[in-house]
């Protein structure tokens, strides 16, 4: 936690700062840093001075520790999916409920691409990847709350700590991996209905495609992955909404031979309920 605190002001946290923030004597700090290094939870960087940084494993431990102490999580289970910028695992609450736990992992795509896409990475020159991931989790938590409040079929956000988001369990398959649907026309209508509900609440997914649309076991739609959402007042809102709808229509046309006019679909989505 002392290293985490120091990373707010240092690219690499000097030992004397860690001693100060940890409120421990230097010998104890050196011993603990050695142990953390052995476990792969932080690493040292040499330059004008030797400093230390958390890595994602160490950051994971801090977040999970906080979630366990808050009685949000009891156990972490198997992986549910690995994406370009996140990992998702199943987990159990102290009450035995299954939930999904999403670890943001910004840095898997290029620094330039992240700055271009994400409004929460405006000050890219000074913000480290762990902090960026925390902002992504905070933003997605807010986006999910707005979407759920509008009746969108999406995971329910339960808790967020640092770069980790806890939400209701995600059960199903990515639309991209589904070879057939009983009613592809009806499924497309459900997708557009959920996009419309989000829009009515002032929210645009902004990264919608077959890779973040889930087909649930009962055949229902589930829209996931909201860290890039924008409001309808965003400067590029219309363009992002058009891209979302275009991506969905293009996929259904190529894979299921279901055609829908883009302008007609956009008009439907933007109609107020």
Image: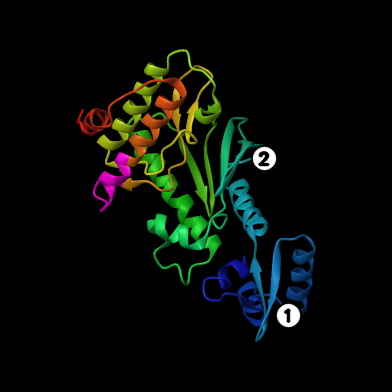
Q: In the picture shown, does residue 105 fall above or below 205?
A: below
Magenta span: 231-242
- The residue pinned by badge 1 equals 26
| Residue 169 higher or lower than 30, as above or below | above
Tell me if 4 is positioned left or right of 138 in this view.
right
Q: Position of residue 214 (x, y in %)?
A: 49, 29
Using a 10 Å C-alpha cutoff, classify the residue at mark 2 as few (fewer than 14 neighbours), some (14 to 19) or many (20 or more): some
Image height check: is 48 above or below 155? below
Residue 76: which numbered mark, if any?
A: 2
Q: Name, please, the residue furthest toward the left.
A: 272
Answer with left or right where residue 226 lies relative to residue 14. left
Magenta span includes 205:
no
- Please report whichever mark, 2 or 1, sits nearer to the chain's N-terminal start: 1
Residue at disc 2, secondary structure: strand
- Report the residue at 54% width, 21% height from top: 179
Residue 236 colored in magenta in the image: yes
């Amino acid at each position: 936690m002392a290293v985490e605190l120091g990373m707010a002001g240092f690219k690499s946290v000097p030992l004397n700062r860690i001693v100060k923030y940890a409120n421990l004597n230097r010998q104890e700090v050196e011993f603990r840093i050695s142990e953390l290094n052995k476990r792969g939870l932080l690493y040292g960087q040499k330059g004008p001075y030797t400093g230390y940084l958390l890595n994602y494993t160490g950051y994971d431990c801090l977040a999970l520790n906080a979630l366990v102490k808050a009685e949000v999580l009891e156990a972490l289970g198997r992986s549910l999916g690995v994406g370009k910028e996140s990992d998702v695992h199943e987990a159990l609450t102290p009450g035995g409920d299954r939930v999904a736990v999403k670890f943001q992992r910004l840095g898997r795509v290029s620094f330039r691409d992240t700055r271009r896409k994400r409004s929460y990475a405006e000050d890219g020159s000074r913000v480290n990847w762990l902090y960026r991931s925390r902002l992504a989790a905070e933003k997605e938590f807010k986006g999910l709350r707005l979407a759920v409040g509008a009746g969108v079929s999406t995971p329910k956000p339960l808790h967020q700590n640092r770069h980790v988001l806890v939400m209701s369990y995600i059960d199903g398959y990515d639309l991209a991996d589904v070879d057939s649907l009983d009613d592809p026309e009806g499924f497309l209508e459900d997708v557009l209905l959920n996009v419309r509900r989000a829009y009515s609440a002032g929210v645009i997914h902004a990264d919608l495609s077959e890779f973040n649309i889930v087909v649930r076991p009962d055949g229902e739609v589930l829209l996931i992955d909201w860290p890039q959402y924008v409001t309808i007042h965003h400067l590029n809102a219309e363009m992002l909404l058009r891209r979302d709808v275009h991506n969905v229509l293009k996929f259904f046309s190529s894979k299921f031979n279901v055609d829908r006019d883009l302008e007609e679909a956009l008009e439907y989505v933007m109609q107020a309920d």
